[in-house]
Image (tube, grey):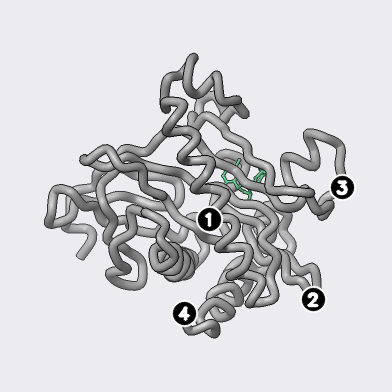
Amino acid sequence: MIEKRKMLYDGKAKSLYEADNDDEVIVYYKDEATAFNGVKKASIKNKGLLNNKISSIVFDYLIEQGVKTHFIKRLDEKSQLCKKVTIIPLEFICRNQVAGAMAKRLGMAEGIKLDKPILEISYKNDELNDPFINDDYATTALKVVTNEQLAYCYQQVLEINKLLEALFLKTGISLIDFKVEFGIDKQGAILLADEFSPDNCRLWEIATNRRLDKDVFRRDLDDIKDTYQLVLSKLEQLNL
Ligand code: TYD
């Protein structure tokens, strides 16, 4: 039982628990949904299970394609075993089409296709509201990564984008944008960490333009559970 284990960290959507091996952690996916930096909140039955399953399928696929990640295996409905890493406090956002904050920031319509994937970074800091920053802020002011580490992360984000854009296309879904995080393990290797689920990407069904991601919660468009279940079913049908 997860409750018997020592909690290492309690986040908005996930908690971390001690694993049997000191180099590993158990990531537990909660049913809580939050948006706008925690201002909008709800508990949605089965959301943890759905994100755990979706993220496990995506990480297994990325690992098979040669991406280095923290993911070891899914343990049960709500938890997974991962390598222990120190999270780099940067959010890496990659965009294939204009949406969300970018559309607002630039006064552009959502859905405009970009000529090439666009990369952004934000400083992970709730008190500061995860501000948008640039490379010099990260490497020289905050010193949270070296130039080499940042270049490696950007290259990984572009590779992940290429792989996942093609994967979702097979299910009739456009990968509009996503956010990922990286961590550093005991050996100093940079690994893709956190999760990949409809909570941190935008997925638009190509045939209908239907939103299959957290925008259904942010904008009250649809039932979040049914929507995430549809994404999971589509991925499962690929039999990866
Ligand atoms: P973005 O358009 O920058 O912000 P918002 O979702 O608030 O409109 O988001 C781009 C993508 O990154 C989107 O798929 C959601 C994801 N994301 C997160 O997962 N966490 C975050 O803190 C932010 C800002 C974005």
Q: Is residue 237 left or right of residue 24?
A: right
Checking the image for residue 219, the label placed there is none
Q: Earlier in the sequence, mark 4 or mark 3?
A: 3
Quick one: SS at disc 2?
loop
Q: Is residue 235 above or below residue 163?
A: below
Quick one: SS at disc 1?
helix
In front here: 61 or 14? 61
The answer for how far apart the CA atoms under marks 4 and 3 are is: 35 Å
Q: Residue 180 placed where, x, y %?
A: 51, 47
Q: Residue 96 placed where, x, y %?
A: 71, 52
Q: Are marks 3 and 1 in contact (CB under 8 Å)?
A: no
Q: Residue 70 placed where, x, y %?
A: 33, 53
> Which residue corresponds to mark 4?
240
Residue at 54% of width from left, 53% of height from top? 159
Checking the image for residue 160, the label placed there is 1
Query: Can you see residue 166?
Result: yes
Q: Is residue 69 left or right of residue 176?
A: left
